[in-house]
C-alpha cells in the first residue's frame, strides 16, 4: 500500500492576540516561511499544504503560498476539522501530520521520527498525527 504523507498547516490571519502573526517578520522572512523551510528538510513528508480560511482577510496567505509554489486549500474559518478533511482529501493524504502555523522552530527530525513510528506501528488510525 502506498502512502502519501502530507503535512497540513492550519493558518489564519485573524488572531485576536496578535493579528497577522504568521506573516510577522523574523530575520527578514515571515514566521510561516521559517516553519515551511524547516519542514522541507523532512525525509518522510511527501507534501506540504497550507489550509486557510476562505474569508477575504486571509487572501495574503493564499498569495504567500503561491509565492512558495505551495499547495493551498481554503475552507471554513469556523470548522477547522472540515478544512483539514478537505485538504487531506484534495491532496490524496493517507497520513496527515497536523501542524499549527505558529511553530517556526519545528524540528524536521522529530517530525520524521513521529511519522516513522506511526508507519512502523502498522496500525491504521482514522485520526491525525499532531505536531506541536
Image (cartoon, rainbow, N blue to C red):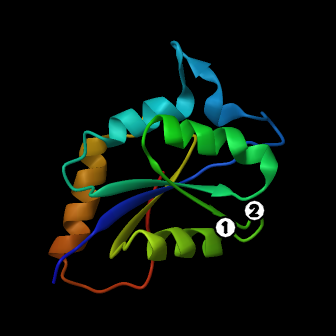
In this image, 98 relative to 61: left or right? left
Q: Is residue 47 above or below residue 93?
A: above
Residue furthest top in the image: 27
Residue 89 coordinates in the image, percent (x, y): 46, 77
Q: Residue at x 51, y 41 (%)?
A: 66
Relative depth, front residue between 25 and 124: 25
Relative depth, front residue between 126 and 121: 126
Relative depth, front residue between 131 and 85: 85
Which residue is tagged 2? 77
Residue 129 coordinates in the image, percent (x, y): 41, 67
Residue 102 coordinates in the image, percent (x, y): 58, 40
Residue 14 visible in the current orientation: no
In this image, 4 relative to 54: left or right? left
Q: Is residue 74 above or below residue 89?
A: above
Check disc 1: other Cα within 10 Å, few if <14, some if 14-19, many if 20+.
some
Check disc 2: other Cα within 10 Å, few if <14, some if 14-19, many if 20+.
some
Residue 79 visible in the current orientation: yes
Number of numbered discs overlaid on the protein picture: 2
- Please give the label number shown on residue 20: none
Q: Residue at x 81, y 37 (%)?
A: 17
Which of the 4 quarters of the picture holds residue 40?
top left
Which residue is tagged 1? 80
Q: Is residue 49 above or below residue 15?
A: below
Amino acid at each position: 500500500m502506498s502512502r502519501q504523507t502530507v503535512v497540513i498547516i492550519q493558518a489564519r490571519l485573524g488572531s485576536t492576540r496578535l493579528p497577522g502573526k504568521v506573516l510577522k517578520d523574523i530575520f527578514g522572512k515571515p514566521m510561516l516561511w521559517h516553519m515551511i523551510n524547516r519542514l522541507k528538510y523532512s525525509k518522510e513528508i511527501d507534501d506540504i499544504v497550507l489550509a486557510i480560511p476562505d474569508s477575504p482577510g486571509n487572501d495574503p496567505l493564499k498569495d504567500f503560498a503561491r509565492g512558495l509554489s505551495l499547495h493551498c486549500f481554503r475552507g471554513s474559518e469556523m470548522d477547522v476539522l472540515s478544512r483539514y478533511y478537505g485538504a487531506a482529501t484534495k491532496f490524496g493524504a493517507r497520513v496527515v501530520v497536523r501542524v499549527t502555523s505558529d511553530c517556526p522552530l519545528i524540528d524536521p527530525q522529530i517530525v520524521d521520527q513521529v511519522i516513522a513510528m506511526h508507519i512502523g506501528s502498522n496500525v491504521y488510525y482514522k485520526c491525525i498525527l499532531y505536531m506541536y
